Image: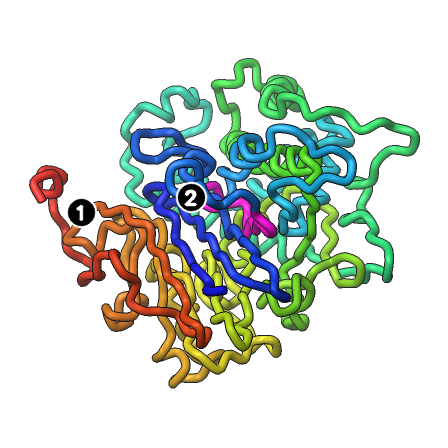
Amino acid sequence: MASIFRALPLGNRDEAFLLETEHKSQAMVILFDSGRDQTRKGMGKLSTYFARHLPNIDHIDIAVCSHNDDDHSSGFVNFIRDWCPTKPNPGGIPKIRELWLPYLFKGIEEAVLDDPEKFVARLLQENIEFAATLDDGLKRTWLGGAGEGVPLSVRRTKRFAVPSRDGAEAAIMAARYEQAVRHTVRAEAGEGMLRPMAQAAMFQPRAGRRRQRPRNLQGILRRLARNLGSGEHTFRNVKKAPSLTLYCGFKLTKKQLEEAKAIVGLVGIAKNRGIGIRWFDFAYDDGEMLVPGGGERGLLEPLNAVEVFPVGRYRTFAKASDALAITIQNVEALVFWRPETATEPGAIFLTDSRLATGENRPEIDFPTPPNLSPDRPVLFTAAHHASDNNDNAYKVLRAWLGGAAFDRAVSVRNGGQSGMAVGTWSDLPKTRRRCAQCFQCFDGCWRLQQVNVASDASGNWIWPPDVTQPCGTPGTTRTVTDCQKA
């Protein structure tokens, strides 16, 4: 059969791709990421999009969540709930057959369900300790306030002169990630068994204790904050920060609890609906790139990750905050590829990866995966919606494929923001790139279009796609009024 690659235009920033292909003489459907869970005008949930535009898709063989970033992952819960309203009968097959997730999700979900109170308390303690290591000026810039003891409500509404607030947040998150990487320990999983992700007491279930249902984690945090310590360190009112460090730790914890809630919700509903879960861990560790492995050989294989079960090497963490700091980072977004076959073309899902280590900037490029050796032009997705922050991905991809093969490849962009700077991706010839939803390439006006790329009988992508508008030159700016007139 002919492969069909679709970039789904779910809305500004959202990224989701669908690949219909063939494997071992069977039709297969792969969903890569889900976009965000939004229901604004023109941006329905993923399940609504399927009902309106893809009514003939009645099952998904593999759904992949690349990392815990909301524009890639937060649409999965409602999509699973809508598509799989009940668990299949014994022996039945759910409409979504497998969900592939980052392995860190497993330990976080177990820790939350084992003891929510302890989980939140440890998270708050760890983040306060981390906040104490940060520069006070950096903390003030991020928090939006000039001094300690400023009510949080005032911090949210009063206009402070902090032009680099986003930059301060990025610097703090990068420092948090770098600390988490330093605390990483990789262990071995024995054949036929899978030990708990983390061996620290933080993640070990109590003997004889039933796992609890997740509770209101933010409520637990507010109560702990009110009773934190004694004397000057007590939160008499959760809306007041007696200490810059304590408030920064509180804010970091609040942010991470939203991430933990999303993870628990996704893993929980997948289990409840009988969807098989497979776990993949980022393969770069302490200067060593492990050989990527696992997945479905010949159908969908990781390029920067290893499947943990039944045999694999995985990371352990003594701190839950370290694990959570990593799950949302683009640097560890899972990259997969659909290998080409005699009749089906190859496709690479770059997601938000730079194909290199380093949070603030690329540091060490990933080596060429041994399982990547296409003979025909491949299709690859734009890295991080084609942001110039991820230009390094194209340099590495050129090294992986070889210059001639890269120059014949075609690319599809999805998501992005109006203020995003499009970098090296726009240097690709206009004839070899397409946007599913874009502001920059369509004269500074938003355009949403489903990009469908089919293959021919020889296993080559048919390019350019029919019906899609050609890309322009990124960087043009126009007003909303101009766009409405266009």
Which type of secondary structure does the marked residue at label 2 adopt? loop
When asked about the image quadrant of residue 453, the answer is: bottom left
Compare residues 49 and 246 and report the one nearer the observer: 49
On the picture, is 174 further left or further right than 325? left
Q: How is the image coloured?
A: rainbow
Compare residues 472 and 59 and report the one nearer the observer: 59
As for residue 351 lying within the magenta part, the answer is no
Q: Earlier in the sequence, mark 1 or mark 2?
A: 2
> What amino acid is at disc 2?
Leu
435 in relation to 269, above or below? below
On the picture, is 346 further left or further right than 223? left
Which of discs 1 and 2 lies nearer the camera? The answer is 2
Residue matched to label 1 = 445
The numbered mark at residue 54 is 2
Compare residues 95 and 312 and report the one nearer the observer: 95
Residue 341 drawn at (x, y percent): 55, 74
On the picture, is 368 further left or further right than 461? right
> What amino acid is at disc 1?
Cys
Residue, far top:
236
Residue at 77% over, 48% down: 198
Residue 389 drawn at (x, y percent): 37, 60
In the image, the segment drawn in magenta is 60-72
Residue 206 drawn at (x, y percent): 87, 33
Residue at 52% over, 28% down: 243
